[in-house]
Amino acid sequence: MSKESTSDVMLDCYEVSKNFGGLQALNDVNLKVKHNTIHSLIGPNGAGKSTLLNVITGMITPTHGSVVFDDKPMLDLSPHEINQLGLAKVFQTPAIFPEMTLIKNVCIPALAARDGAFKLNMFQKAGMKSIESFAEETLEEVGLKDSVHKEARFLSRGDKRRLELAICLAHRPKMLLLDEPTAGMARHETENTILLLRKIADRGMTMVIVEHDMNVVFALSETISVLAQGTIIAEGTPDEVKGNPKVIEAYLGEEQE
């Protein structure tokens, strides 16, 4: 195994393929994500981006191939076990507890990270004061300090995404997977999200972002991989990807029309 694969690479997908009946959603995808980088995955609708994220998080079993995270093989692990290893996903539709306050939303994963599992009596366990303080700090980090006791259902879409991000951060992950983190946001919310993700990345968080908004992709990414018809057709820096004829033909050309 190369020096890069053992020391620099946090996530290594090797020849990952997935068939759904007669449909090949992924075709021998090779993806390496380095530590402490923001790596974006772009491509037209139906290219296989969300399928790849679902394979990485254990939601889908690939037809063949391997996924290694932080030097640990992942394919025999459940989504819960993968999350416990330090990989958290922010979904397209915010996965929150709408009837609970923001602080309880964040206390739940914080307690699960501490105890190793969700438990019915988790809010009655010892050590809640420190957990609540941690939850408040996490909500402050994502810009929700003034809403900690508000029920999550009353938040705007942008703030619901921020809450879900806080929920993921409460797991103390090593890597964040973000599936269209700015989808449905107003422009000012998108700009605020870019600033927030930069701040989190500057603390050493590794991120994989699936996103259709090229302003977001080019503002955040150090490396971009381009999927088309289940295959990575190009990879490189934002400038390299912008000028790649294959990418322009398969994706950026239609985005700019």
Image: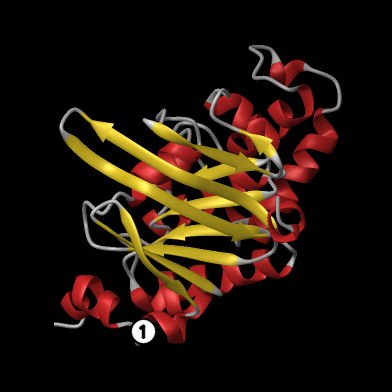
Left or right: where 55 falls relative to 130: left
Q: Which of the pair 219/102 is nearer the observer?
A: 219
Tell me, yes or no, if residue 5 can be seen here: yes
Residue at (69, 64) in percent of width and height: 36
* Quadrant of the snapshot with the C terminus: bottom left
Give the camera-side residue of 50 and 190.
Answer: 50
Q: Position of residue 196 (x, y in %)?
A: 58, 68
Q: Position of residue 117 (x, y in %)?
A: 68, 20
Which colouring convention does the figure follow? secondary structure
Q: Residue at x 21, y 56 (%)?
A: 45
Figure check: 137 above or below 126: below
Using the image, determine if residue 121 lies above or below residue 225: above
x 70%, y 44%: residue = 70
Residue 252 % position (x, y) = 25, 77
Above or below, comparing residue 139 to residue 257 in the picture: above
Residue 107 shows in this picture? no
Query: In the image shown, does 247 or 221 lie closer to the viewer?
Result: 247
**Image-quadrant location for residue 202:** bottom right
Picture residue at 59% right of the left edge, 32% below the top: 74
Q: Residues within 10 Å of mark 1 (few under 14, many from 20)?
A: some
Q: Is residue 13 above or below residue 192?
A: above
Q: Which residue is mark 1?
A: 242
Answer left or right for 177 relative to 146.
left
